[in-house]
Every structure is written in structure tokens, then in C-alpha cells.
Image (cartoon, helix red, strand yellow):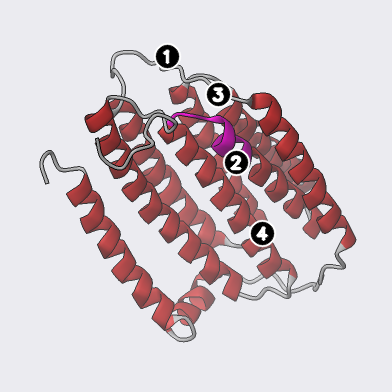
């Protein structure tokens, strides 16, 4: 727990799993969950570098900004997904390939 | 003791993250994501970032996860918990992420990271607040405008007939 590498490895595993979710899931909401995993992995790295770089608080501010951006992204993405569902009756991202119908 | 707790939290985080992307039921994925987010908040506590851990719990678990579950309920039949969704091309995806993880591991192990020891701060809230309102004031204001834009945009997008 006092090693930077252990945090970086956890973040790398979370990032890889998030990428796996994004590229294998076809449900729009499941893709969004993969994106959340990726953002969390990046955030762990920010906070870990902040802790092991001599307790520098700039990383904390970046972590906060990432969390806020994730919230905005989730809200807009879900609005878009619900719109796609209303128009096409599916949220399969492979079938939703046209901007208008 | 703290060591065991750390590895327990790390294991919860990683295993539930794997459950999020591997199982076939959407609601189960959302519940597993809850445990992942809790685990990440625990890791923040181990990294002495108490304020970020609190914000993680409030925003992610209290906000984003509820939004995601709302999204699941609005785009599927509410009565069925077993909303299945299949994954495609798991073989190729698995090969890609194993390659990606090996690459990241090599980078992590080869890089001589800065490893400075520091005193554990009593609380990070005061420092983060000072930075937010002095050094990072412009990003702070910009992100509030961005939140307003996301709020209006999401409300406009999800109306019945905009």
C-alpha cells in the first residue's frame, strides 16, 4: 500500500477492463459503464501521482475536474441514449449508425 | 492490518470491474459498478485524498449510478430485472486488452517514478479549496459554465418534442 506501482497496476487493470467493455458491449448504457471505468482509472493515477509526488494537491484538483466532467458526460450521454431509444426503439450502438431517419 | 485492508479493497475493485464488463445482465453490471466505485473511493482514502473520496461517493454513487439505472429502466421493460445484452467479439477484445495491459505494465515497471515521501496531511479540504479558488480559478468557473450547458443540453435533448 506504500508503493506507487500497486496503484498504477490497479489503474491499468481498470483501464483495460473499461476498454474491453467499450469495444465488446453493444448496449449504449453498458458502453457508458466502460467509459466510467476508464475515467476512474485515470483518476486513480492522478491521485496516486499527487500522493507520491510529495503530497502535491494539484492532482486532487484535476481529480475533481474529472469527476465533474464525468457527471456532465453521463447526463448528456443518457439523454442521447434515451432519444435514440425513442426514435429507433433500440439502444444497440451498431444499429444506431444514422444521424437521422 | 492496513495492508490487508488495502488488498481487500483492491480485490473488490478489480473483481467487480471485471464483473461489470463480463456478465450478461445489465442491472447486475450496474450493481457491480457500485462496488467498483466504492472500491475506488477506498483507494482514494488510502491515498490520503479524503475530500476526493467523499466527492466520489456523492457524485458517482449518488448521482451517476442512479442516472445509469434510470437509463436502464427507461430503455427497457421495467418489470424484468434480467435485461440481457450480449457482447460481441470477445476474443478480439480480450487479445487487445491483454496486449494493452502488457504494454502498460512494461511502462509502469520500466519508468523510474518519482517517489517522494511526505507527511500525511490532517485534511486535504483546505488545500484543495485554496487551489480551486486561487490557482485554478479559471478552470473552476469554466467547468461551472460547462455543467450549466450539460444541464440545459440534457433537458432539451430528452424532451418529448423539442
**What numbered label is drawn on residue A45?**
4
Q: Nearer the viewer, mark 3 or mark 1?
A: 3
Name the residue that disc number 2 marks.
A18
Chain under numbered label 1:
B
Give the residue drawn at x 61%, y 32%. Answer: B16
Position in image of residue A9 (x %, y %): 76, 49
Q: Which residues are magenta?
A: A19-27
Position in image of residue B17 (x %, y %): 61, 35
Q: For residue B57, say whether it is visible.
A: yes
Q: How crowded is the residue under tag 4: few (<14 C-alpha within 10 Å), some, or many (20+)?
A: many
Majority secondary structure in the magenta region: helix
Rendering quarter of residue B74: top left
**What numbered label is drawn on residue B82?**
1
Q: How crowded is the residue under tag 1: few (<14 C-alpha within 10 Å), some, or many (20+)?
A: few
Give the residue drawn at x 37%, y 34%. Answer: A96
Residue closest to the eye, B44 or A15: A15
User: Mark 3 and mark 1, same subunit?
Assistant: yes
Q: Nearer the viewer, mark 4 or mark 2?
A: 2
**What numbered label is drawn on residue B87?**
3
Q: Is residue A53 above or below residue B56?
A: below
Position in image of residue B11 (x %, y %): 71, 36
**Residue lying at the far bottom of the rendered structure:** B134
Q: Is residue B121 above or below residue A6?
A: below
Q: How crowded is the residue under tag 3: few (<14 C-alpha within 10 Å), some, or many (20+)?
A: some
Q: Report helix, strand or loop for mark 2.
A: helix
Chain under numbered label 3:
B
Question: Which of pointers 3 and 1 lies earlier in the amino acid sequence?
Answer: 1
Amino acid at each position: 500500500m506504500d508503493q506507487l506501482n500497486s496503484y498504477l497496476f490497479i489503474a491499468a487493470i481498470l483501464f483495460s477492463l473499461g476498454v474491453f467493455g467499450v469495444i465488446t458491449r453493444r448496449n449504449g448504457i453498458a458502453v457508458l459503464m466502460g467509459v466510467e471505468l476508464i475515467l476512474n482509472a485515470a483518476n486513480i493515477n492522478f491521485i496516486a501521482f499527487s500522493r507520491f509526488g510529495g503530497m502535491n494537491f494539484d492532482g486532487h484538483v484535476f481529480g475533481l475536474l474529472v469527476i465533474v466532467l464525468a457527471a456532465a458526460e453521463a447526463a448528456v450521454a443518457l439523454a442521447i441514449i434515451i432519444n435514440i431509444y425513442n426514435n429507433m426503439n433500440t439502444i444497440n450502438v451498431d444499429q444506431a449508425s444514422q444521424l437521422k431517419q | 492490518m492496513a495492508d490487508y485492508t488495502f488488498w481487500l479493497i483492491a480485490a473488490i475493485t478489480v473483481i467487480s470491474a471485471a464483473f461489470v464488463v463480463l456478465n450478461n445482465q445489465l442491472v447486475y453490471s450496474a450493481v457491480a459498478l457500485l462496488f467498483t466505485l466504492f472500491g475506488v473511493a477506498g483507494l482514494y482514502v488510502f491515498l490520503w485524498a479524503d475530500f476526493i473520496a467523499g466527492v466520489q461517493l456523492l457524485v458517482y454513487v449518488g448521482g451517476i449510478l442512479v442516472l445509469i439505472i434510470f437509463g436502464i429502466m427507461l430503455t427497457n421493460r421495467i418489470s424484468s430485472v434480467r435485461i440481457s445484452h450480449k457482447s460481441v467479439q470477445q476474443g478480439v477484445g480480450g487479445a487487445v486488452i491483454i496486449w494493452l495491459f502488457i504494454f502498460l505494465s512494461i511502462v509502469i515497471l520500466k519508468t523510474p517514478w518519482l517517489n517522494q515521501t511526505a507527511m500525511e496531511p490532517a485534511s486535504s479540504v483546505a488545500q484543495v479549496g485554496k487551489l480551486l479558488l486561487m490557482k485554478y480559478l479559471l478552470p473552476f468557473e469554466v467547468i461551472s459554465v460547462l455543467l450549466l450547458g450539460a444541464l440545459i443540453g440534457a433537458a432539451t435533448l430528452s424532451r418529448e418534442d423539442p
